[in-house]
Amino acid sequence: MSGDYRHHTLWTTLESCPLCSMAIVMSNVGTVTFAARDRLWDGISRLTELDEFIASRWPIRRGPLGGPVSVFCELLPLLWFLEHKPSGSVVEKYESQHPRLLALAKTLSTDKGLTDLKAHPLDVALNQLWPDLAAIGSEESSDTGHA
């Protein structure tokens, strides 16, 4: 049946925001797997408590993946927000909820680091960032009690 994606999985870098969540509900996607949480929209899954239509079509949600890849997926949009909205709500949220990741993002965006990373293929850039991503990922795991 056209438009029936209940047996499909949508993979995303971040947990879906309200707009994306509603698009997923309306598209009837069965599962969403996200690499990293979106700290601005914590609690988005509570929308199912407010509306039975949303609840009936809400996908299975899996994530965050954890570890360095998860940290990288959270870092990417944070770099954009630092460049375009440095005083906005996303940066404010990271100041209180994830200062270490914000510090890495600021370091990358204020020195030549990000420009240098952009000049390389993804695997090279990830290799350069991996020690920092792994340290932040292991810190997150110990804070939340996950392994």
Image (cartoon, grey):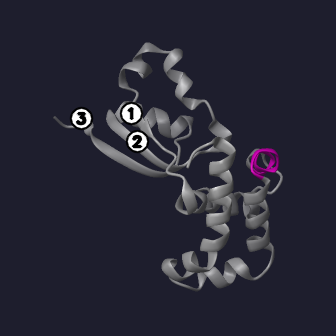
Q: Are marks 2 and 3 in contact (CB under 8 Å)?
A: no
- In terms of image quadrants, where is residue 132? bottom right
- In the rendered image, residue 92 lying in the magenta stretch gets the answer yes
Q: Nearer the viewer, residue 146 or 17?
A: 146
> Which residue is located at x 54 percent, y 52 percent?
66
Identify the residue position indicated by label 1 in the image: 60
Name the front one of labels 1 and 3: 1
> Which residue is located at x 43 percent, y 37 percent?
61
Left or right: 67 as drawn, with respect to 55? right
Q: Amino acid at mark 1?
A: Ile
> Which residue is located at x 49 percent, y 51 percent?
65
Earlier sequence position, callout 1 versus callout 3? 3
Where does the image place residue 16, in percent across and percent down from the top left?
A: 52, 41
Q: Amino acid at mark 3?
A: Asp
Where does the image place residue 51, in percent across and percent down from the top left?
A: 48, 15
In the rendered structure, find residue 4 and report the number of the disc placed on it. 3
Earlier sequence position, callout 2 versus callout 3? 3
Where does the image place residue 128, in percent across and percent down from the top left?
A: 61, 80
Identify the residue position indicated by label 2 in the image: 32
Left or right: 97 as drawn, with respect to 70? right
Disc 3 crowd, CA 10 A, few/some/many (<14, 14-19, 20+): few
Q: Nearer the viewer, residue 60 or 115?
A: 60
> Which residue is located at x 16 percent, y 34 percent?
1
* Local SS, label 2: strand
Report the magenta residues as a range: 91-98
Q: CA distance from mark 2 to mark 3?
A: 14 Å
Q: Amino acid at mark 2?
A: Val
